[in-house]
Amino acid sequence: MELDEFTQANAPESGGERFQLENSKLLDITVDGTVMVKAGTMVAYTGEMTFTGKSSAEGGITGFVKDAVSSEGTPVMEAEGSGHLYVAEQEKKIQVLELDADDAISVNGNDILAFESRVDYEINTVGGLSEAVAGGLTNVYLSGPGTVALTTHGDPLVATPPITTDPDATVAWSTNLSPSIGTNKTIEIGQQSGESIQMEFTGSKGFVVVQPYEEGGQPAQQ
């Protein structure tokens, strides 16, 4: 490929939405004011931009939320300024969702990427998950209206309940669902499978997003 062809083929798209995919793994956010992004996901920006970590533990979203088990959380920062902000995370695929005023979604803290500042949000821990679970301890609850971007290893599956999932592979669910955490001891007969801790979603409405990858498992093949 000629150099000119390379630069033209991979140049940023002009116009489009405020949250615009440059490709399946790179998001271009047009910033004119503020936007919330996961800390460590900025790969480049144009214009003037400042980044501030959110650390308040009272109300709304918190920046570095500590859970009682692992002392880890979901670091979130506020980007403020004017220009284009490019974000990505470990070559994960990016899913951009438009939330209406009556829409709400709960996203695994590992999988949140960015959202508009007008989105109402709160970070909570998911009760019942033990320290044996590599991911899924902290979830971000988001309610519209506004745009939200989340990440998945590979293409996600969006299923309707009833369904039982592995916490390490569970990306998000509609907030009308309240998963119960349980242990399926029958799976452990004979040898340890690593699949004993499960999230059970019941009912007939709503959705659950899972990915073909466990956050505590082997590296995903993209």
Image: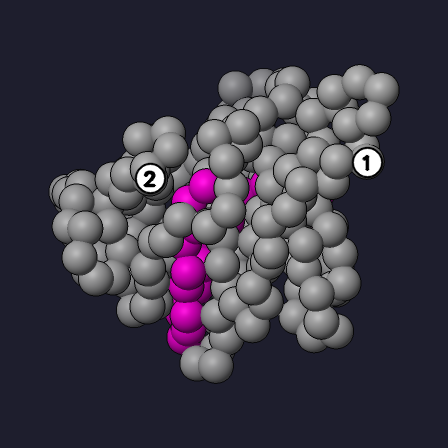
How many marks are shown on the rendered structure?
2
Q: Residue 168, labelled with which disc?
A: none
Judge the density around disc 2: few (<14), some (14-19), many (≥20) Cα neighbours within 10 Å: some
Q: Amino acid at mark 1?
A: Thr
Identity of the residue furthest to the bottom in this view: 102
Q: Which residues are magenta?
A: 137-156
Q: Main secondary structure of the magenta part?
A: strand
Is residue 123 rendered to the left or right of residue 203? Answer: left
Q: Is residue 158 positioned above or below 109 on the image?
A: below
Badge 1 marks a residue whose secondary structure is helix
Residue drawn at (81%, 36%) of the image: 186
Residues marked 1 and 2 touching at CB (< 8 Å) = no
Seen in the picture, residue 140 relative to 63 is either above or below; the reply is below
**Quarter occupied by residue 147:** bottom left
Check the picture and name the quadrant holding the N terminus: top right
Residue matched to label 2: 67
Question: Where is residue 159 drawn, in percent x and y?
Answer: 75, 59
Q: CA distance from mark 1 to mark 2?
A: 29 Å
Q: Which residue is mark 1?
A: 186
Q: Is residue 64 above or below residue 18?
A: above
**At 74% from the left edge and 40% from the top edge, which residue is drawn?**
184
Q: Is residue 130 magenta?
A: no
Q: Position of residue 164 (x, y in %)?
A: 73, 51
Element type where label 2 sits in the image: loop
